[in-house]
Image (cartoon, rainbow, N blue to C red):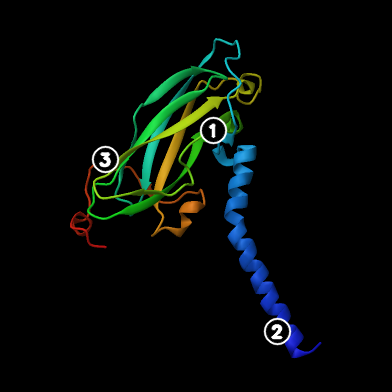
Amino acid sequence: MSKRTTVAGIVAGIALMTALTAAAVPLYRLFCQVTGFGGTPTTANAAPGFSGDPTLVTVRFNADTARGLFWEFRPLLKEVRTPTGEQVTVFYEAFNPTAREITGVSTFNVTPLKIGEYFAKIDCFCFVEQTLKPGERVAMPVTFFVDPGMLKDPLTAEVRSITLSYTFFDSDRTAEARVPGPLAMHTMRDGRIPAALLQGET
């Protein structure tokens, strides 16, 4: 085998590994959404409607921002109680209090993790970049339903409380934002923002 052939093989191998790396994130996201793995809600086009079972499930809403994203982010409702199968729409609000335009992207999951395959998302703002101008405030809808199948599954039949969590990342500064995982995060409760951002410096 000639050196030229060997080099060509190495270059092709590197190109293949690069392509697989680029595809890994969307493939992982698709896998999680289809299977509910890791507490990732599944996706659906529409809710099936009231299942006939009067059992109510409490869905609580949580909002976090990753370190370095100086937005204020919160759910407009703390929780809702819903029967399984019914479509529910709630809103999260994001506010950019800084003097510069910031683009963020969010990930999400539900707990307990085992309920992921029975929490179906119809529409939301996750994995879509959101750009807020200085001082801009937006309300972002989330539409979902709790699959009636959870009440028939021995592993989830006892669940009556679910928490839906969203975490926003600065998409310009945090490449890891697109991979759900245990990244450092905090909730903007104290309102402390670096003076440089308030003055519009980057």
Numbered mark located on residue 189 in the image: 3
Residue 1, horizontal then vertical, whole percent: 81, 87
Which residue type does callout 1 highlight? Lys
The answer to whether residue 57 is above or below residue 168 is above
The residue that label 1 is drawn on is 121
Q: Nearer the viewer, residue 90 or 110?
A: 90
Residue 143's label in the rendered image is none
Residue 162 as seen in the image, left or right of residue 32:
left
Q: How many neighbours does mark 1 have within 10 angstroms: few (below 14), some (14-19), or many (20 or more)?
A: many
Q: Which part of the image, by quadrant, shows the C terminus? A: bottom left
Question: In the displayed image of the protein, which residue is found farthest to the right?
Answer: 1
Looking at the image, is mark 2 or mark 3 earlier in the sequence? 2
Q: Residue at coordinates 51% horizontally, 20% vertically from top-left? A: 160
Residue 154 coordinates in the image, percent (x, y) = 66, 22
Cα–Cα gap, marks 3 and 1: 27 Å
Q: Which one is earlier in the sequence, the residue at label 3 or at label 1?
A: 1
Q: Secondary structure at mark 3?
A: loop
Q: Residue at 41%, 55% (x, y): give it.
A: 171
Which sits earlier in the primary sequence, circle 2 or circle 1? 2
Separation of residues labelled 2 and 1 (CA atoms): 47 Å
User: In the picture, residue 53 is in which quadrant?
Assistant: top right
Position of 57 compared to 3: left or right?
left
Q: Which SS class for mark 1? A: strand
Disc 3 marks which amino acid? Arg
Residue at (58, 24) in percent of width and height: 47
Q: Closer to us: mark 3 or mark 1? A: 1
Distance of mark 2 from mark 3, alpha carbons?
A: 55 Å
